[in-house]
Image (tube, rainbow, N blue to C red):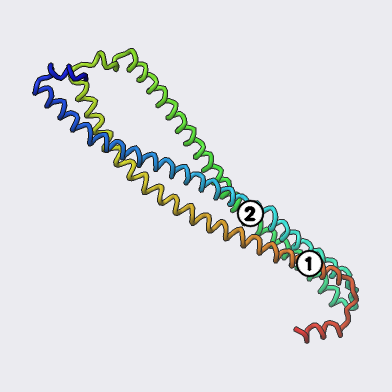
Amino acid sequence: MLVSDWTHVSNLELRVMVKKKQEIEPQKLALDSLNATIMDNKAMIHQSRANIEENRLLILSNQSAAALGNQQLANHNTEEIFESRKTVLVTFDPETDLQANYIEVASRRSELDFLLHSARLNEQCLTINKMMVEANALLIEITDKIMRLNQDILEFNEENLDSNNELIQGVLNPLVVEEGMVEELQAENDSSFEELDRLSSKNRKEIVKLLEQSANNKNIAIQHNQEISQRREKLYINRQDVKTMRGSVGREIDYADIFLSNSEE
């Protein structure tokens, strides 16, 4: 408003303008504060998502190393051990029927031990597979929620594009404002202030919890990674022991060797 225009403003109109400005200023400060909080929440949510994705990659890497690396090596060692046992039993030349019967029964016992071990492993693997199926179902559900969220954003954008057009050349243009529209819009603003304050406070608490959970998950994943590496070293030692044992298969053993071995133990 130009200086010359103030001469046409009555005292009543001036008091109304001052009052409205006094009402608007606190709202602007509150809006700025809410904007800062919500944008800060948004940044923290993106950081939380990045932490979650980083943890997921580490967890999947651990899972692959444990299932495709260590487990396969362990199973291979098991097979080698029982194949060696079969070879050991076959190479014996029994001198009595008792020895022959023992070799037959021991061979069957060895095969049963291996099959029982395999069946129990199958049961545990089935349990893991079921959990993985459930995890995949949960990932599908998460993807569905992300897709719905994207649709909500799209619809929000379309709605507000229409509002922009109405503001430019439609019923929302300030040139065609009617009595009561300002008060109605202000009432909506007041309601939105309350909802924004509630949502931003609630979201901040949830973000803090998620960040703490992600930090805990990362520590567990790192610990798992270390355990997987340590177990792999033990499996390599186990593999070397199997190799050494297989090298002794077929070597002639007499009673003296057996008694000497027992005395050492």
Label 2, secondary structure: give it: helix
| Rendering quarter of residue 165 | top left
| Rendering quarter of residue 189 | top left
Q: In the orientation shown, which residue stands out farthest toward the bottom? A: 263
As measured in the structure, the alpha-carbon distance from the residue carrying label 2 to the one carrying label 1 is 26 Å
Q: In the orientation shown, which residue stands out farthest toward the front? A: 3
The answer to whether the residues at label 2 and label 1 have Cβ atoms under 8 Å apart is: no
Name which residue lies at 83% across and 72% down. 103
Q: Is residue 145 above or below residue 109?
A: above
Left or right, residue 113 beside residue 179: right
Name which residue lies at 62% across and 54% down. 62
Left or right, residue 101 beside residue 179: right
Earlier sequence position, callout 2 versus callout 1: 2
Position in image of residue 256 (x %, y %): 86, 85
Disc 2 residue type (three-letter): Cys
Disc 1 residue type (three-letter): Gln
Q: Which residue is mark 1?
A: 240
Query: Which label sits on residue 125?
Result: 2
Position in image of residue 14 (x %, y %): 13, 24
Q: Is residue 84 above or below residue 194?
A: below
Position in image of residue 61 (x %, y %): 63, 51
